[in-house]
Amino acid sequence: MSSPSTFECFGLVIHGYDVEETIRRIDQNLHEGRSTVIVTANPEILLSAKRDSSYWNVLRQADLRLVDGIALKFAGWLSGANPKRATGVDIAKCLLQESSARNWKIAIIGGDPRNAIKAAWNIQKSHPNLSVFAEHGGIIQTDGSDDEHGEELRYRLTQYAPDILLIGFGHPKQEMWIARNLTEFPSVKVAIGIGGTIDYWSGIKQRAPHWMRRIGIEWFFRLIHEPKRWRRISRAVLVFPIVFLWDKIHIHSS
C-alpha cells in the first residue's frame, strides 16, 4: 500500500502534489465552477502561521497548500506521507504554459516596478500569444492592505479581468492580499503567491542549477549568492525541523 501524499503541519493539511496533479485539481475545481487559491507552503510560511492566527486562518482557507521546500518534504516523510515537491517557480511556469494554450489572461503583481515590467516582457518573448498584465502593486502591509497606488491597481485589474493571478509580495503579504481582494476579481480561475519568482523571470536573480534543485539544496545556492539571507535560510533549514518535531512530540504526548 502506497503512502499518502497529504500530511499535517501545525494543524494545516499540506498537499504533497506534483505540478501535474495540481493542474488536475485546478481543472476539477473549474469543472465545479470554482476558482483555486494555492499556497506554496515552505518552512518560513508555516512558522509565520504558527505565530499568527490570522495568517494561519488565511492559509487554512486556501484550496491547496503545496510542498515548497525540502524541509517540508522531510516533515511529510516523518508524518508517514510521501509528498512531492511543487515549488512556486515551477507551478507559475506551468500556469504560463497552460494560459498560453488555453488563451487565459495573466496578471503579475509585485516585485520592483521595473522587474515586474521586465518579467512580463521576457514572458511574452517566450509566449508571444499570451496576454500579460504586470505592475508592482504599491506598498503592501502585512495584513494585505495597500496604499493609494494599490487601490488604483485593483481598479485596472478589474478592467483587465485576469484568469490567472500571480502575486509576488512575499509572505505573509501575498496570501493576505489574495484573501482580502480575490472577490473583486470574479474572472480569476487561479490565484497563487509566487514570492521571488518575478526576480527570476526578470533576470535579476538566477535560479540554482537543476541538480541542486532536484536534491533540495537550492537554499545553499541562495546563501552563496545572497549571504544576507542567512537568517531566513537558517529558519528554514534549522529552526523549522526542531519546531516541527517538538510540535509532533507535544501532540502525541497530550
Image (cartoon, rainbow, N blue to C red):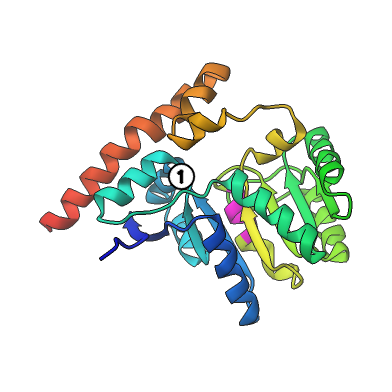
Give the x, y percent position of residue 239: 33, 34
Which residue is at the front of the view, 185 or 118? 118
Q: Is residue 159 magenta?
A: no
What kind of element bears circle 1?
Answer: loop
The amino acid on which the numbered mark 1 sits, given as a three-letter code, is Asn
Which residue is at the front of the view, 140 or 124? 124
Residue displayed at 32% across by 63% down: 4
Instruction: State which region is magenta.
Output: 173-178
Give the x, y percent position of residue 230: 46, 22
Give the x, y percent position of residue 209: 57, 28
Residue displayed at 51% across by 50% down: 86
Main structural element of the magenta stretch: helix, strand or loop? helix
- Total number of numbered labels? 1
Residue most toward the bottom? 32
Residue displayed at 78% across by 54% down: 107
**What residue is shown with label 1?**
42
184 over 170 or under it: above or below? below
40 over 118 or under it: above or below? below
Q: Is residue 13 left or right of residue 139?
A: left
Q: Is residue 176 magenta?
A: yes
Give the x, y percent position of residue 148: 81, 50
* Residue 29 sits in quarter: bottom right
Q: Is residue 69 left or right of residue 164?
A: left
